[in-house]
Amino acid sequence: MTKLQAEVENIKKLINQSQNIAVVGHQNPDGDCIGCCVAMSEWLVSKGKTISIFADGDIPEKFFYMPKAREFNQHSAIEHFDLLIVLDLSDVDRLGVWNSLTAKSDKIIVIDHHIKPAFNQADILIDLPQYASCGEIIYDLFELLKVKITFEIATALYTCITCDTGCFLFSNTTANTHRVAEALMAKHKIDIEAINFKNFRAYDRRNIPVVTYVLKNMKFEFGGRLSISVLPYKFVKKWNLNYESRHGLFKYATDANGVICSIFITELSKGEFNVSLRSLGTIDVAKIAQKLNGGGHRNASGATYHGSLKDLKQILVSEFAQVID
């Protein structure tokens, strides 16, 4: 019996006993996080529950093809909740401004696909890192609960899967990933062309100067196997780059031929840096991110670093030197 099968009756019981439910994802929510929250909320609303959806950060407009994506952060968190459902969250600190929800909720369910999520307050903790996306877990949970998969839920869960696998490119893609995607497509004629175009092809032409800067200033180490990109604060400010605008830039650091690992450093303010690490194959960048008090997945992780850029680059190059062969 899997951990999900073992807990499904307990999850059902807590949801049935609750009326006022908060659904929350992580800071700077991505497609998997947003899709999970949307799918869960769609189902709970169909059961007559009162739902509030939260995530610390702006919801990118490209996800507004899911109507409930517009409903994030529309309610106050000062009230009491019978149940808090936390989705795609590796660490309680990543609740950000919504951390107070944990103290205002009678019960907490956490469903996640990161390795050993740090969430000690949970009454039920489902952590299944073998899943490529949290959306896959939600789909299997819904199957166990015999939830009717509507068009809206299918669209949301497909978004989860395609976003966290890089449109089925990343090594976390499994046979189960394809099984769930096939099942969602079989249930409804979801517009996979539009979903994937919005998330992987479309770009804002205002970002052309940013992309040009990143490509021209990329550096390489270890015979071209490691790429390093640095986006100074003066350009972040000049081009008014929000999280979503910056987030898509790391792909250019990874996509060059011969590159198997990449470092993308964004200067958020003087002495504060956001670090995005990516890798191909079996190189585990999560372990490197952990050295900087960060984390994530084997092939995609990140951290926030306080100090000098010179020291940060030295630390990272030294760490990659130990694993890149």
Image (cartoon, rainbow, N blue to C red):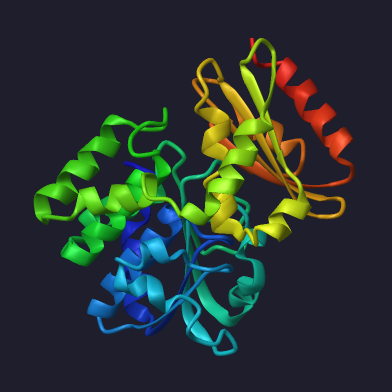
Based on the displayed image, in which of its 4 quarters is residue 191 positioned? Answer: bottom left
- If the image is split into quadrants, where does the C terminus sit? top right
Based on the displayed image, in which of its 4 quarters is residue 27 positioned? Answer: bottom right
Q: Is residue 49 above or below residue 294?
A: below
Based on the displayed image, in which of its 4 quarters is residue 222 positioned? Answer: top right
Q: Identify the residue shown where x is 89% and y is 45%.
A: 307
- If the image is split into quadrants, where does the N terminus sit? top left
* 126 lies left or right of 236: left
* 306 lies left or right of 214: right
Q: Is residue 109 above or below residue 315?
A: below
Q: Position of residue 287 (x, y in %)?
A: 67, 31
Whether residue 4 is visible, yes or no, is no
Q: Is residue 148 above or below residue 274?
A: below
Q: Position of residue 165 (x, y in %)?
A: 39, 39
Q: Identify the residue shown where x is 49% and y is 86%.
A: 75
* 51 lies left or right of 187: right
Q: Is residue 45 above or below residue 210?
A: below
